[in-house]
Amino acid sequence: MTSRGSDGREMYRVEGADTRCSFCGKLPQDVHTILTSRESAICDECVVGALDTISRQPGYLFVRIAFRIFRYVASLNRLFRLGPGM
Ligand SMILES: [Zn+2]
């Protein structure tokens, strides 16, 4: 699966078994998803940590609210065993 930027270029790709997260070093079997760009990779856990950090910056009130809603929905996902929660 890939995601594309506004210019149509491929931005991220979900990778296979040998790709480590560039931030925490975890392998795909340790996390739910690893996304890669040309130069780096990031796992779903580090994405959530990054969003949490960004949402705590001054001036990001609405991002903070959206992040809290995201965490709530992710917990429902885990509760109903639809996938990993955060
Ligand atoms: Zn990671």
Image (cartoon, rainbow, N blue to C red):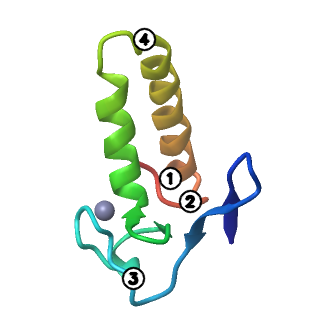
Amino acid under label 1? Arg
The residue indicated by pointer 4 is 61
Identify the element where label 3 is drawn: loop
* Residue 67 at x, y percent in the picture: 46, 29
Give the CA distance from mark 4 to mark 1. Answer: 26 Å
Residue at 45% from the left image edge and 26% from the top image edge = 68
Amino acid at pointer 2:
Arg
Secondary structure category for the residue under label 4: helix
Corner quadrant of residue 22: bottom left
Rendering coords of residue 70 (x, y %): 52, 34
Of the two numbered discs 4 and 2 on the same chain, state the one appearing first in sequence: 4
What amino acid type is highlighted by mark number 3? Answer: Thr
- The answer to whether the residue labelled 1 contacts the one labelled 2, judged by CB atoms less than 8 Å apart, is yes
Q: Which residue is mark 1?
A: 78
In the picture, the disc for residue 19 is 3
Label 1 SS: helix
Please name whichever residue, 32 or 55, is drawn nearer the observer in this view of the structure: 55
**Relative to residue 57, is residue 34 drawn left or right?**
right
